[in-house]
Amino acid sequence: MKMRMVTVAMAGLLALSMAACSGPGAGGGDSGTDSGGPGDTTIGVAMPTQTSTRWIADGNAVKEGLEKAGYKVDLQYAADEIPTQTQQIDQMITKGVKLLIIASIDGTALTSQLQAAADKGIKVIAYDRLIRDSPNVDFYVSFDNYKVGVAQATSLLHGLGLVEKDGKPVATPPTGTQNVELFGGSSDDNNAPINFSGSWDTLKPFIDKGNIAVKSGQTEFAQAATLRWDQATAQTRMENLLSSTYGGNGEGLAGVLSPFDGISRGIITALQGVGMGPTIAEGLPIVTGQDAEIASVKLINDGVQYSTIFKDTRTLAGQAVTTALSYLKGEEPKANDTKTYNNGVKIVPSYLLEINTINKEDIKPELIDSGYWTQAQVDAGQ
Ligand code: BGC
């Protein structure tokens, strides 16, 4: 009898505490700490910065997808500050999120956050950038970062008349050696060296044949890297290269490998600043890019930037949401690569998506017709 009363009392307490957790309205309270239906569960989404339109699109698309599935989302941007991002993730864990989706700033700076998440059974999905040196990264969704580098270098060679758009060498390449310079991404982002090696492996045979040369001699990733993928840093390095190697006016410079549209715009500003161009038709060197940022899509449309690599953030966000939903249902998500992405501790199961090179003629079919940008946005550059 006594035993039964205790059981009844406990059931009553449980009911009370569940009611307290469910909070106002159909979706429940903000705590996200219970594990009732999706409406009671919060997912933490940590994005690096809002200075680039791609991360804003990524964040919004992930949030929308999870909310459609009935979950709450705590979406945070960290202004490219590592301590801000670690603090945001600490807070998400303390508040009781059930799963984390993280696009890291420094891929090596989150080991203790990920340990805290693992201790609480919180699954971690690395978004676009692999998180390194931690056993507690459960999954990685990204594009094939090596292929991005290959595509950027191929596009540079295409712009220089050395290959077809698909990378096949042309039958009669231009004679003589064309000078190029190389830029890489942020050395603390795992994507950057992979990206650079894809480009380097593609350019190397053309360097060996004498079709192109890196006149500054700065061919190592460490020399080419651009901390935080920062536009102003890239502009300064390009200005320095122009004065040290190209007579201060860019003479003899035919192309620049750029790994990201923000960096491309810094490079283009430097080139135009010494009187080159202002368009490719008027002698501006071939400059590549990545992310199909609206400001760069306009430059491509205007014949200023040569190309960008389109990584459809809607598809990536969709894949992150699919992966998250599998974990939340207690299932193993589907990977399409279980060999490539070693984070220094383990191979992280990955889902890698396809990319597209965008030149001027691809803007309409790839970006406008698919609803990624409108014609009005392309015209305005914002
Ligand atoms: C992403 C790129 C992006 C870069 C700068 C990289 O990790 O893969 O798409 O251009 O970060 O934000």
Image (cartoon, rainbow, N blue to C red):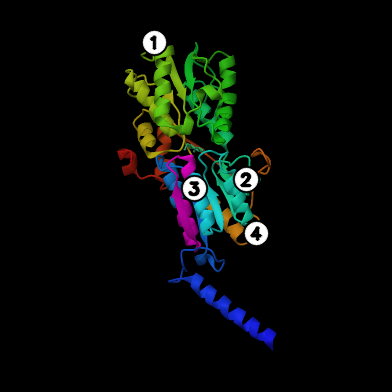
Determine the CA span between mark 4 and mark 2. 15 Å
On the image, the x and y values in percent for residue 356 come to: 50, 38
On the image, the x and y values in percent for residue 86 come to: 51, 45
Determine the CA span between mark 1 and mark 3. 47 Å
What secondary structure is found at the residue carrying circle 2? Answer: strand
Q: Nearer the viewer, residue 257 or 136?
A: 136
Determine the CA span between mark 3 and mark 4. 29 Å
Image quadrant occupied by the C terminus: top left
First-in-chain label (4 vs 2): 4
Q: For the residue marked with disc 2, what is the amino acid?
A: Ser
Res 331 label = 4
Q: Give the foreground label among 2 and 3.
A: 3
On the image, the x and y values in percent for residue 261 come to: 43, 33
First-in-chain label (2 vs 3): 3
First-in-chain label (1 vs 3): 3
In magenta, the rendered stretch is 61-84
Res 87 label = 3
Q: Nearer the viewer, residue 230 or 81?
A: 81
User: Which residue is denoted by mark 1 in the rendering?
Assistant: 247
First-in-chain label (3 vs 4): 3
User: Which residue is denoted by mark 2 in the rendering?
Assistant: 350
Is there a contact, CB below 8 Å, between mark 4 and mark 2? no
Determine the CA span between mark 2 and mark 1. 46 Å
Say which residue appears at 53% left-offset and 56% top-offset: 94
Position above or below: 344 against 220: below
